[in-house]
């Protein structure tokens, strides 16, 4: 299970419409301060990677506010986010690869979860339309209709792997939110969807962009950035989501200092979310600052071992091995050896990582001139299932000490 690898376009689509989906926009005729506070509390569960608690919280809100479209949409999105988390689709290093969702996935979203998602969407639609019948032209009711189109778009992209369906729903979401801005330029929460749509369209891969162009879909990268920055600075409720998107886009544009600032801000706001902590390490890597990257990865690992709230959700069995690999590639073989040796005695370490940890530990011990200890590690390799040619390598190194290639 790899936790430190991810993709760019998926996350842009993921958060393109996240804020209007899970947040609420206040209006005297539509929402109360009590609802705003309860909605924010539920959203905090989302940002803490506590999806079960978020789903339960939104169910409670739906009972308390039976005419409100927001809890149903937010609950639907929480089901979808939980699925993305289980697939490990919230990862920063892959953000520059646009082809992930053109490939088959090994995991299928359970039918029960899909039904829950679509049921929430339709309940949101019904309540938003009913609200608009009572309050024709109301911006908040229209806002939710745009938000549910955004939800359908990101679901099509991330779960169904359909670019064109995603673009179709995305266009509807954009049109609704853009119309609201044209009517009320100070409705800053809508700028998030509009800005993201502009940026995504201007950065589609060539094999999709020509289809979008034929369909009359065009974007403007600079304008997209302007709208996102405006949402981050002036929106009432979507500032976090705008900062999260800007973190991703700044990485893509190689403006790493700005991206790092966004990651640090998000982690300060949600210290239980280990992903924001990992993002900082990954940005340091992109900056070629290997020292701070290594220190940050080790900090994440330490907090996971200490079982800090929600850091225990990190798949420690594979993460420790991956960090050891990174340290070894940076020439920090002493630290890497320590992590390999901890991995082989930790019952949470997966079979593959356990076998390879014995092999890598043996290689480092050979480099350090500790031949007997190295040979003991190679013998341990042969006790486990063969993975990635580990048995052959161990046999070879039992005969001839490992030397750096």
Image (tube, rainbow, N blue to C red):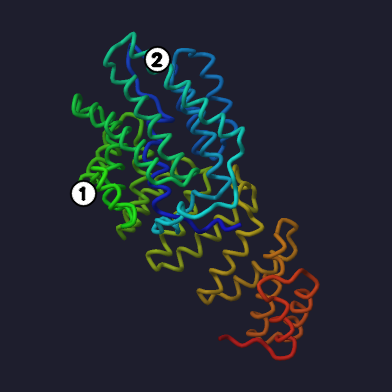
Q: Position of residue 84 (x, y in %)?
A: 53, 44
Q: Quadrant of residue 114?
A: top right
261 to the left or right of 358: left
**Residue bearing mark 1:** 222
Q: Residue, x 76% and y 83% (percent of image)?
A: 375
Of 192 and 207, the residue lying toward us: 207
Up-down relation of residue 142 to residue 114 (above or below)? above
Up-down relation of residue 204 to residue 149 (above or below)? below
Q: Quadrant of residue 165?
A: top left
Q: Upstream in the sequence, badge 1 or badge 2?
A: 2
239 to the left or right of 405: left
Q: What whole-number distance in Å separates the C-alpha atoms at marks 1 and 2? A: 36 Å
143 to the left or right of 43: left
Check disc 2 and report its element: helix, strand or loop.
loop
9 to the left or right of 189: right
> Residue most toward the top?
134
Up-down relation of residue 106 to residue 175 (above or below)? below
Quadrant into which the N terminus falls: bottom right
Q: Residue, x 37% and y 54% (percent of image)?
A: 260
Check disc 1 and report its element: helix, strand or loop.
helix
Give the numbered dot on residue 32.
2
Q: Quadrant of residue 321?
A: bottom right
């Amino acid at each position: 299970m790899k936790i430190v690898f991810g993709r760019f376009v998926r996350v842009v689509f993921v958060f393109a419409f996240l804020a209007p989906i899970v947040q609420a926009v206040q209006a005297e005729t539509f929402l109360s301060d009590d609802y705003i506070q309860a909605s924010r509390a539920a959203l905090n569960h989302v940002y803490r990677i506590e999806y079960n608690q978020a789903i339960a919280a939104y169910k409670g809100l739906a009972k308390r506010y039976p005419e409100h479209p927001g809890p149903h949409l937010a609950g639907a999105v929480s089901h979808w986010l939980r699925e993305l988390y289980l697939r490990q689709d919230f990862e920063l290093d892959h953000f520059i690869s646009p082809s992930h969702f053109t490939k088959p996935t090994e995991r299928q979203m359970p039918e029960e979860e899909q039904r829950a998602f679509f049921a929430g969407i339709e309940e949101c639609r019904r309540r938003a339309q009913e609200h608009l019948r009572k309050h024709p032209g109301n911006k908040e009711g229209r806002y939710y209709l745009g938000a549910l189109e955004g939800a359908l778009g990101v679901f099509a992209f991330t779960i169904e792997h359909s670019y064109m369906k995603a673009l179709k729903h995305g266009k509807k979401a954009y049109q609704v939110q853009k119309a609201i801005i044209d009517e009320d330029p100070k409705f800053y929460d809508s700028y998030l969807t509009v800005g993201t749509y502009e940026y995504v369209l201007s950065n589609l891969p060539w094999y999709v962009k020509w289809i979008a162009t034929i369909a009359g879909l065009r974007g403007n990268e600079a304008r997209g950035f302007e709208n996102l920055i405006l949402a981050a600075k002036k929106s009432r409720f979507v500032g976090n989501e705008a900062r999260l998107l800007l973190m991703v886009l700044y990485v893509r544009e190689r403006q790493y200092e700005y991206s790092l600032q966004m990651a640090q801000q998000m982690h300060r706001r949600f210290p239980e979310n280990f992903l924001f902590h990992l993002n900082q390490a990954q940005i340091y890597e992109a900056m070629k600052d290997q020292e701070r990257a290594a220190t940050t990865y080790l900090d994440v690992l330490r907090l996971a071992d200490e079982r800090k709230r929600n850091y225990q959700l990190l798949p420690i069995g594979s993460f420790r091995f991956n960090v050891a690999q990174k340290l070894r590639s940076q020439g920090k073989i002493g630290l890497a050896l320590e992590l390999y040796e901890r991995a082989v005695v930790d019952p949470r370490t997966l079979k593959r990582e356990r076998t390879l940890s014995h092999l890598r530990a043996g290689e480092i011990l050979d480099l350090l001139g500790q031949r007997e200890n190295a040979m003991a590690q190679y013998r341990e390799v042969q006790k486990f299932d063969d993975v990635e040619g580990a048995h052959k390598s161990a046999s070879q190194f039992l005969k001839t000490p490992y030397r750096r290639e």
